[in-house]
Structures are given as C-alpha cells and as structure tokens.
Amino acid sequence: MPLHVPPAPAPALRTVLTALGSPTAVREARTPSLRAAQGPASPELPLPVHVLDHITETTGPSRARLTGWRFLIRCGERAVAAADTMLTPDGWAFSHFFEGPYVASTERALRQAETLTKPYQPRLLSVPELYMLTLWLHGDCTADAATGHPEADDILVPLAPAPPGIAAHRPHRVAELLPVLTHRLTPARATTLLA
C-alpha cells in the first residue's frame, strides 16, 4: 500500500532549493557526500519532524509538536544527505544539511512501510530524552501533517542507531512501544530526583 507523503509547506521547500543552489551553503555544509555528489541534487520525500517531550508526564497523553520538515537529498539513485528546515517568527527557514546513519535508515524504514497493507501518512518522531528517532506511520492519511499526536494504533519504526535494547527497523504499535519508553525513563528521573 503506498504511503501518503504529505506536501511540505512551499516556503520550506523553497529554502532547501535555495540552499542547494548556493555553492557557499553546499561547500560549508559538513556533508562530504553532498559536496562530492555528481549531477543534480534534489529534495524529495518531505517528512514533518515532530518532537515528543515529557513522555513520563501523568497529566494526559503525550503530545507531539512540529519542529520542522526534513527532506532527503537525492543524487542519482540514492539519498546522499538530508536537509532540515525550521519554523521561525518570519516563516520557514533552512536549518542545515547533514548525513549519517539516519539518512539510510529513514530510506530503509520508508521502503519497509511501503510493504504494509494499510495506508499511512509518514512522519518523523523524535524522543530527545532517549536520543531516539522513529518513522511515525500515522493512520489518518488525510490529517494535517503539522498537528496531532501518536495514536494507539499508529506504528513507530525506530531508526538506526536505536537506543540499547530497542531493535531498529522493528515496527511497533504506539500502544506497545510508548509504555516501554516511559518505563525506561521513569527510573532515571526517580534517581535524579533522589540525588
């Protein structure tokens, strides 16, 4: 079943295209593969990046907040880097280019998701408290990609490198994985509070 990739805000895409067209921005990027790329590079597969903070709070369900859009930068047959944008008081702005394991891991997780029988809207969900990034497969394909929170039946696919004890690229329902993450953080917070 194909994924329903949400369209990125046009100003966010424009900032990435402008950065890709700027020899200075590409040259100063700490992405050797982007600097060495042969041929044109294009931004593809825009994914909204949401952050899930304070997952151990007992005041209600965890909420995700949009922090930006990430574009995979493709050159030829593969993604060589990614570009992040962020929302500022003046609108969308280019943040930075980067490369590393999350680029290939994101591509792999998206290919995995394409084999699922149910349609999903792909997003990225970051859990900063665990240094964890997941592909978030949201079950409502018509939802505004900038809003919402993980629903119990949504799927989370941890990207590599995943935290110790959590298998990368193994899909989990939110209702199954979120309690595990909450449990992992709770003892750490209790120890910090007692110290």
Image (tube, helix red, strand yellow):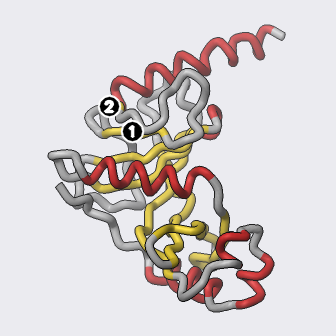
- Residue that sits furthest to the right in the current view: 195
Residue at x 62% of width, y 79% of height: 37
Q: Residue 78 location, x and y as percent? A: 48, 68
User: In the picture provided, is 29 more to the left or to the right than 161?
Assistant: right
Q: Quadrant of the C terminus?
A: top right
Q: Is residue 178 above or below residue 149?
A: above
Q: Which residue is rendered at x = 59% and y = 39% of the image?
A: 161
User: In the image, is 150 to the left or to the right of 186?
Assistant: left
Q: What residue is shown with label 1?
A: 156
Query: Residue type at mark 2?
Result: Arg
Name the side, left or right, on which 42 lies relative to 35.
left
Q: Quadrant of residue 32?
A: bottom right
| Residue 101, disc | none
The x and y percentages for residue 165 are: 55, 21
Please give the count of numbered marks on the rendered protein: 2
- N-terminal of the two: label 2 or label 1? 1
Label 2 vs label 1: CA separation? Answer: 6 Å
Mark 2 Cα-neighbour bin, 10 Å: few <14, some 14–19, many ≥20: some
Near-viewer residue (43 or 95): 43
**Which residue in the rendered view is the most extreme toward the top?**
194
Residue 68 vs residue 42, the one in the foreground: 42
> Quadrant of the rendered structure where residue 83 is?
bottom right
Mark 1 residue crowding within 10 angstroms, few (<14) / some (14–19) / many (20+): many
* Amino acid at circle 1: Leu
- Quadrant containing the N terminus is bottom left
Q: Nearer the viewer, residue 146 or 39?
A: 39
The residue indicated by pointer 2 is 173
Which element is circle 1 on? strand
Image location of residue 75, percent across then percent down: 52, 77
Task: Tell me, yes or no, whether the two marked residues, 2 and 1, touch with CB atoms within 8 Å.
Answer: yes
